[in-house]
Amino acid sequence: MSNDMLTPLGARVSAVLPFVGAAAMAGSVAYDWGYLGSLGISFREAPTSVLDHARSWLIWVPGVALAILFLITVEMALSRAEGGMSEDELVSSSPNPNLTRRSRELPFTVMAWAAVVGVVLWLLFAEIFPMARIGIPIAWIVFAGFVFRHPRAGARFSEYIGILIFGPPVLFGMFIIGAELARLEMASDAASHRIELRPPARGPESVRLLRTFHDWTLVRDGSGAVVWIPSSEIVRIQRLEAHKPFKGFICKFFDRGCAIIAEPVPDKPAADRVSGS
C-alpha cells in the first residue's frame, strides 16, 4: 500500500477516532446509569469516578461488536445473493414490482409493529415484561428511518442532525441493557464469590459479586442488601464456581467426548485477587 493511499486513510481514521471515543464514553455512562439505577443507586450516591465509567466499555463492547459483526455478515451475504443491485434496481427488475416492494418493506413493518406491541406490554405489564421497553428506542429508530427514506425529507437533515436523532435511542438501548443485566444478577439467589476482609472484620463471607470499580467493589450480601466495599479492605476474592471451558456442542448437549479436556481441580480456588498489599 502506497503512502498516497495511507495518507487519506490515516486522515479519516484520525477524524473518526474522537467520535468513537465520545460515543463509547456516552454508551458506558448510559449503561452504568441503567445498571446502577436498577439496583436503586443513583450517580449522586455512587462513589465512582469518570474512569470507572469509561472502563465499562470493556463489559458491553464485546457483545455489541459481535452483534455488529453478525449484521455485517448478513448484509454481505444478502448483497452477494442480490448481485449487488440497489433497492430500486431490485424492484424495477422484478416481474411484479409492487409485490417486490411490499415484500422488501415487510421486515420494517414487522419491526415497527413489534416495537409498538413491546411498548404497550411494558406500559401495561412492566413487572412481567421489563425487557419489552426495548420497543421504545426501536420504535423511534423505525419512525426516524421512515422519515429519512423520503428523498426530500432526508435531504433537509445533515449528518450531525442524524446523530442527534438516532443517538438518543441508541443510548436508551444501552441504558436498558445495563438495567436488565442488573435485574438478572439480582434475580439469582446464589452467591458467586467468597470475600475476605482485613481484620478486625469477620471471617470470609459468601456474596454475589456485582461489579468491581477502581476503589470500590459492589456486592449483594447474604441478607440481600447491595453493599459498597472499599477495595483496599478486601484481602481476597475467591470465585465459588470453577470456570468451565467450552468442550464443544457434542459434549454440551449429548455428554459425549467430554473426557478429552480435564476437569478443573475442585479444591483449588478458581480466581483469587489480593489487593492493598
Image: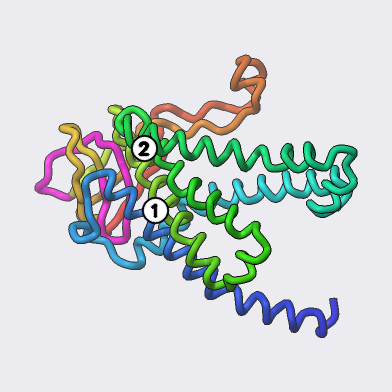
Name the foreground residue: 156 vs 202: 156
The picture places residue 169, in percent across and down from the top left corner, at 46, 54
> Label 2 vs label 1: CA separation?
25 Å
User: Which residue in the structure is indicated by mark 2?
Assistant: 239
Region of the chain picked out in magenta, as a range: 198-218
Tell me what residue is drawn at x 36 percent, y 37 percent. 239
Q: Is residue 177 above or below residue 57?
A: above
Q: Position of residue 212 (x, y in %)?
A: 33, 52
Give amino acid for label 2: Arg
- Viewer-closest of 77 and 122: 122
Mark 1, secondary structure of its residue: helix
Side of 117 relative to 98 (left or right): left
Task: Estimate the x, y position of residue 135 in percent, counting from the top left.
Answer: 46, 41
96 sits to left or right of 14: right
Q: With 99 as the anchor, is 117 left or right in this view? A: left
**Residue, x 53% and y 51% (percent of image)?**
143
For badge 1, the amino acid type reads Tyr
For mark 1, does the 10 Å Cα neighbourhood hold few (<14), some (14 to 19), or many (20 or more) residues? many
Q: Residue at x 23, y 43 (%)?
A: 196
- Disc 1: which residue: 31
Neighbor class of circle 2 (other Cα within 10 Å; few <14, some 14-19, many 20+) is many
> Looking at the image, is mark 2 or mark 1 nearer the viewer?
1
**How does the figure colour the protein chain or chains?**
rainbow
Image quarter (top left, top right, bottom left or bottom right) of the C terminus: bottom left
Classify mark 2: helix, strand or loop. strand
